[in-house]
Image (cartoon, rainbow, N blue to C red):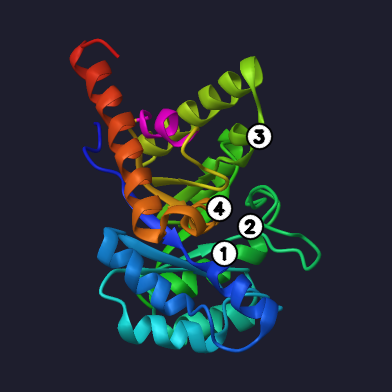
Amino acid sequence: MCNEKIRLGVNIDHVATIRNARGGVHPDPVKAALLAVEAGADGITAHLREDRRHISDRDIDMLMARLSVPLNLEMAATAEMVAIALDHRPASACIVPEKRQELTTEGGLDVVGGHDHLAPYVEKLRQAGISVSLFIDPDEAQIRASKAIGADKVELHTGTYVEKTGAARAAELDRLRRGAALCESLDLEVHAGHGLNYDTVEDIAAICQFTEFNIGHFLVGEAIFVGLAESLQQMKRLMDRGRVRCEDKKTGGAG
């Protein structure tokens, strides 16, 4: 069944990255989140890292107090982060792999190998009424393991697709397509994220099973030139255009 609309979750981490480069309070990621919501964001994503390199604990406090849309808290699977999530009760928590030296999240979680470590955290979050997502590669074994561990949804890693070109990109797009179809068959809500930009988002949006994209770095970077509202709204226009192609395939139209 084709989801008519795809939600856009705007990741505000890199507003905080700019703030932290000089210290102080400007630019304020919470203000950016409120502007994004005003411009049409369906949710806000923030990654509270163990080293607090961008989003801070105070940012999470303020987001929970002021947002009118769901907050998706990206977090590592650690006792500290689970305690913070349980204290704040965001709408959802997306568990991601985290390495201290990485510039950004590099690939998906190993849910197959990490079952015993992840399972207690997933259970605690879900018992608290927090919807749990796992950030994984579009791999059959990882998708099935995510379902078995009790996740409500998964976010498929699109970074490899974005980085490839030509036949390699087409192959990765097919991998994402097959992964999304498997998620649907397992009754796992399926999201997409990492590296998506104006040139790549439309083809992903044409995959009918995706319900949400989480995009941050590109939107914040583009906002330097056109403003946050315009960068976000252009992304939504391209997402909608891709979703029309999905509808065309379902009805047999051209596209």
Q: Secondary structure at mark 4?
A: strand
Determine which of the numbered discs, if any, sits on residue 115 in the image: 2
The amino acid type, in three-letter code, at marker 1 is Ala
Within 10 angstroms of label 2, few (less than 14), some, or many (20 or more) residues? some
Q: CA distance from mark 1 to mark 4?
A: 14 Å
Measure the C-alpha gap from mark 1 to mark 2.
Answer: 6 Å
Q: Real-space Cα distance between discs 4 and 3?
A: 18 Å
Kind of residue at disc 3: Glu
Tell me residue 5's x, y (percent). 24, 42
Above or below, comparing residue 196 to residue 255 in the picture: below
The amino acid at mark 4 is Phe
Name the image quarter holding residue 101.
bottom right
Residue 135 badge: 4
Q: Main secondary structure of the magenta part?
A: helix
N-term mark: 4 or 3: 4
The reply to whether discs 1 and 4 touch (Cβ–Cβ < 8 Å) is no
* Between 15 and 109, the one nearer to me in the picture: 15
CA separation in Å, label 1 and label 3: 31 Å
Q: What is the C-alpha distance between the residues marked 2 and 4? A: 14 Å
On the question of residue 116 being in view, the answer is yes
The region drawn magenta spans: 200-207
